[in-house]
């Protein structure tokens, strides 16, 4: 007989998956004709301007900008996609969730979210399907963990997520909350909870710039039904971020907040995101590892997180097991809850060429504006919700925590390595590398003349005798050293060495670590694994680390000695302000604790302070020689006075000191006018020209067809799955009982090429009853860090796999831009029996939005 599913939140989600799959189209790499062959970017100038999201469509149609990189609201995007001359790009670039404040309350008060069971129960009043379908108009997917169902690592946790049954179940939530509130001594008076005669109030910080305002209102209504007195505090970006992340949670100025996280790029094997969102040690959980604040603590999460982050595993399967354990524990702890993954709609002129679409971030990626141009137009104007907010701080140590600053900065700086926009694997960008490893079971000898910073002695010292490390990475920085900084000074090995010193001294120097406590505390576990450095010649440096990964490129990514974003003299001047003069701080929490400025190189008064220090260095003949003296040799550098003068001249010309090395140079920054202007940097030694890094768009995996013969209990059966896509394809599956949420069988389907088989033996089916079971399929490829999810219904009453005519379950090909499918808001009833998901990976560290 047919049994009614109890997975209230899952079945309808599959409908949404199909709807989005049909609307999200990505094309293969298109031909690109560079506008010129000069070094640097395609465009001569980039201008960033702020346009409120509600007026952005009209501004784009009027020609006031060429691309809008803040996600448009869904209905506005649908209308704009119909306009001739506009091209729409889509990407699952934003995660929407809640962070709950678990701090205990002061005597006489009660914080419900200090109780784990109550936090977990909030999952069951999140009507994710309603939010995705109604509030986001179908342009979002329900989200249950830090990973979306399109992330490559979702293959690792999917069966566990299915079994946790986190669908909308308000009655179950109310039962749990009632029991726990009564246990805590609360009483229900006129359907409202009280503690010691006072209402139990929840202060709910709700963002107002986008759909989160309505999401917050919807969730607040559910909290009220549970008996809480919910006080909504509507705030925009800067005010909300300051209240939640820069304050001691014990003050209980907030109880929950509508978080938004913007994805910067693809990451196939995650280690950063899971730690960022769940592990206290990394400083992104309530308390933020700031000295004097109440801290959310969980030693098990920290232990599991560090093992994943620092490569303390011996195989892929062991890593996956650690990842599963950590995810399950974190979801049970329920400090962060996840609501939806929003598919962002980015609009641009249809004549814009050179857009590389990251499968996670879309056109909002490292590569796009380096190659993008509009024919017969030398300037690109880029619109965003903000160019500057009160929380926008530009410094390379503790700044760039907001997406708006990062959107500009990424065009000014070249990373040594980056995450490939299709594969999600680390790859060389401006530094090349070779990896040698003895891991996971052995070690390499670290050379006796290798060195490490000794904070107690205040100099680089040779490593201790018989020092060993798991891996060695040799980096070649010659593509940096052949060119100049934006202030005209040569990039040199000294810049790299100073950056290494700065990181180590801030962590191991007791005076400095007491000032930048949170930064030092969260960085130390990583720096402890760096065993030594050895300079080989003018361009190359060896790095020895206790780190292993089954993909060698991740070893290189971990071992990068410094990002090389800022000239050493600017870093030295900022260090002087932060640690010697105590007139500024690198981090927001240190700035608040010591009542000093949060240092920003685009703040004119802060930059003037840096200039004044540089002038003092020049007048006094100050040179940090001890920093450049390694046991091997003194690292040579060009004239320190000339460097100081060049940076002072740069300030005099541009009124800021955001100096870097990438394809664009910042020439004007006006925070009041919400305006930034960047000129192309065309130094003859700059190593890249238009087209060198262009990739276009990826070809994603698609589940094209699922078929079977007759299915009956006690009989063997085969279900055939057909895929399309590039690379080596694979299918993972989970057979789920919808009545209990139990995963009955899971594994990898057999097959090769594009055809795979899920084989069910007679023993597998003998205990099944006649009725419907869910079969979740995850199609993947080694060529893209994206997974395609599809659910089909398995009819064990003598039927087969229930599919919908014309349902391809996923990506149907086509162009990366163009219109938005009307199916975004049309949900055929027939689709309730099945569906599919084509989604791009949403992994790696994220930025507050």
Image (cartoon, rainbow, N blue to C red):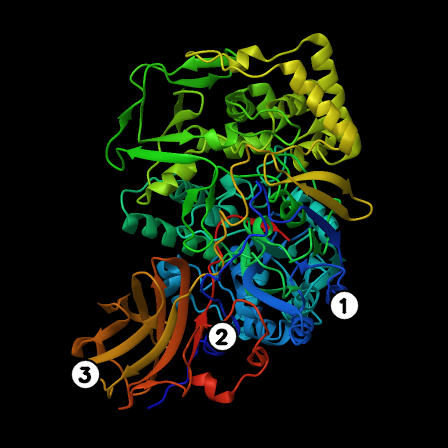
Q: Which image quadrant for residue 390?
A: top right
Q: Earlier in the sequence, mark 3 or mark 2?
A: 2
Q: Residue 759: horizontal and vertical position, in percent?
A: 21, 74
Q: Nearer the viewer, residue 140 or 514?
A: 140
Where 439 falls versus 318 (above or below)? above
* Residue 26 seen by the camera: yes
Q: Residue 639: horizontal and vertical position, in percent?
A: 62, 14
Where 208 falls versus 669 (above or below)? below
Where 833 falls versus 372 (above or below)? below
Q: Earlier in the sequence, mark 1 or mark 3?
A: 1
Give neighbour class at mark 2: few <14, some 14-19, many 20+ (Cα, 10 Å).
many
Q: Nearer the viewer, residue 147 or 111?
A: 147
Q: Residue at x 46, y 13 (%)?
A: 630
Q: Is residue 530 left or right of residue 666?
A: left
Question: Which of the labelled discs sits on residue 714, or is there none?
Answer: 3
Give neighbour class at mark 3: few <14, some 14-19, many 20+ (Cα, 10 Å).
some
| Quadrant where the N terminus is found in the figure | bottom left
Where 317 falls versus 435 (above or below)? below
* Cα distance between the residues tagged 3 and 2: 30 Å
Q: Residue 561: horizontal and vertical position, in percent?
A: 46, 30
The residue that label 1 is drawn on is: 58
Q: Residue at x 37, y 54 (%)?
A: 324
Question: Which of the labelled discs sits on residue 13, or is there none?
Answer: 2
Q: Residue 92: horizontal and vertical position, in percent?
A: 54, 62
| Nearest-to-viewer mark from 2 and 1 | 1
Q: Is residue 238 left or right of residue 763?
A: right
Badge 2 marks a residue whose secondary structure is helix
Badge 3 marks a residue whose secondary structure is loop
* Cα distance between the residues tagged 1 and 3: 62 Å
Q: Residue at x 59, y 13 (%)?
A: 624
């Amino acid at each position: 007989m047919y049994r009614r599913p109890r997975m209230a939140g899952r079945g309808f989600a599959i409908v949404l998956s199909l709807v989005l799959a049909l609307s999200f189209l990505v094309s293969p790499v298109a031909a690109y004709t560079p506008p010129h062959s000069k070094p640097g970017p395609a465009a001569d100038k980039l201008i960033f301007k702020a346009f409120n999201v509600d007026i952005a469509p009209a501004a784009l149609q009027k020609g006031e900008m060429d691309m809008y990189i803040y996600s448009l609201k869904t209905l506005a995007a649908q209308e704009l996609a119909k306009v001739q001359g506009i091209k729409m790009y889509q990407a699952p670039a934003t995660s929407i969730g809640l962070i709950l404040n678990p701090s205990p309350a002061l005597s006489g008060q009660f914080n419900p979210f200090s109780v784990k069971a109550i936090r977990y129960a909030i999952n069951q009043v999140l009507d994710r399907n309603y939010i995705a379908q109604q509030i986001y108009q179908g342009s979002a997917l329900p989200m249950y963990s830090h990973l979306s169902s399109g992330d490559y690592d979702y293959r690792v946790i999917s069966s566990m997520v299915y079994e946790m049954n986190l669908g909308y179940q308000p009655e179950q939530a109310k039962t749990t909350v009632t029991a726990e509130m009564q246990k805590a001594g609360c009483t229900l008076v006129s359907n409202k909870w009280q503690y010691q005669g006072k209402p139990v109030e929840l202060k709910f910080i709700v963002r107002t710039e986008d759909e989160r305002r309505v999401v917050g209102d919807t969730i607040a209504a559910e909290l009220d039904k549970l008996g809480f007195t919910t006080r909504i505090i509507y705030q925009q970006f800067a005010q909300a971020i300051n209240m939640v992340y820069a304050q001691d949670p014990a003050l209980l100025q907030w109880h929950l907040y509508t978080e938004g996280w913007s994805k910067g790029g693809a990451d196939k094997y995650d280690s950063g995101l899971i730690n960022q969102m769940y592990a206290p040690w990394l400083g992104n959980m309530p308390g933020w590892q700031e000295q004097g604040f109440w801290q959310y603590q969980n030693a098990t999460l920290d232990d599991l997180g560090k093992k994943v982050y620092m490569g303390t595993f011996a195989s892929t399967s062991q890593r996956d097991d650690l990842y599963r354990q950590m995810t399950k524990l974190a979801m049970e702890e329920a400090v962060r809850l996840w609501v939806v993954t929003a598919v962002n709609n980015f609009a641009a002129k249809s004549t814009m060429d050179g857009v590389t679409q990251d499968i996670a971030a879309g056109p909002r990626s490292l590569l796009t504006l380096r190659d993008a141009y509009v024919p017969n137009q030398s300037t690109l104007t880029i619109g965003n919700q903000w160019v500057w907010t009160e929380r926008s701080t530009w410094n390379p140590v503790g700044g760039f925590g907001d997406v708006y600053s990062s959107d500009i900065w990424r065009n000014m700086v070249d990373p040594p390595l980056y995450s490939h926009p299709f594969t999600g694997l680390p790859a060389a960008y401006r530094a090349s590398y070779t990896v040698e490893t003895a891991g996971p079971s052995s070690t390499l000898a670290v050379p006796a003349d290798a060195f490490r910073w000794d904070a107690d002695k205040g100099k680089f010292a040779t490593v201790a005798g018989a020092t060993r490390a798991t891996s060695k990475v040799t980096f070649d920085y010659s593509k940096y050293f052949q060119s100049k900084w934006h202030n005209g000074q040569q990039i040199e090995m000294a810049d790299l060495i100073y950056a290494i010193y700065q990181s180590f001294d801030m962590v191991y120097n007791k005076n400095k670590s007491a000032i930048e406590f949170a930064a030092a505390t969260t960085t130390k576990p990583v720096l402890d694994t760096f065993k030594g450095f050895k300079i080989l010649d003018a361009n190359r440096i060896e790095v020895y680390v206790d780190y292993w990964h089954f993909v060698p490129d991740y070893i290189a990514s971990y071992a990068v000695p410094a990002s090389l974003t800022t000239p050493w003299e600017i870093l030295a001047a900022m260090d002087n302000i932060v640690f010697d003069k105590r007139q500024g701080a690198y981090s927001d929490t240190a700035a608040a604790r010591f009542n000093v400025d949060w240092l920003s190189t685009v703040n004119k008064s802060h930059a003037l302070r840096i200039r004044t220090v540089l002038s003092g260095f020049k007048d006094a003949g100050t040179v940090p020689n001890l920093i450049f003296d390694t046991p091997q040799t003194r690292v040579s550098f060009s004239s320190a006075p000339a460097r100081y003068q060049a940076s002072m001249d740069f300030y005099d010309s541009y009124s800021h000191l955001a100096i870097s090395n990438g394809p664009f140079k910042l020439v004007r920054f006006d925070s009041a006018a919400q305006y930034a202007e960047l000129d192309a940097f065309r130094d003859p030694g700059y190593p890249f020209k238009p087209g060198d890094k262009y990739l276009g768009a990826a070809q994603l995996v698609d589940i094209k067809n699922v078929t079977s013969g007759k299915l009956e209990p006690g009989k063997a059966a085969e279900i055939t799955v057909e895929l399309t896509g590039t690379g080596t394809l694979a299918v993972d599956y989970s057979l789920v009982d919808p009545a209990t949420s139990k995963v009955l069988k899971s594994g990898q389907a057999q097959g090769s090429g594009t055809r795979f088989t899920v084989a069910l033996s007679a023993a597998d089916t003998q205990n099944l009853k006649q009725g419907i079971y869910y079969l979740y399929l995850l199609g993947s490829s080694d060529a893209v860090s994206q997974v395609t999810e599809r659910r089909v219904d398995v009819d064990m009453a003598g039927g087969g796999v229930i599919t919908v005519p014309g349902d391809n379950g996923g990506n149907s090909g086509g162009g990366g831009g163009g219109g938005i499918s009307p199916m975004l808001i049309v949900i055929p009833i027939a689709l309730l029996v099945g569906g599919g998901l084509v989604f791009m990976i949403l992994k790696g560290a994220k930025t507050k939005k």
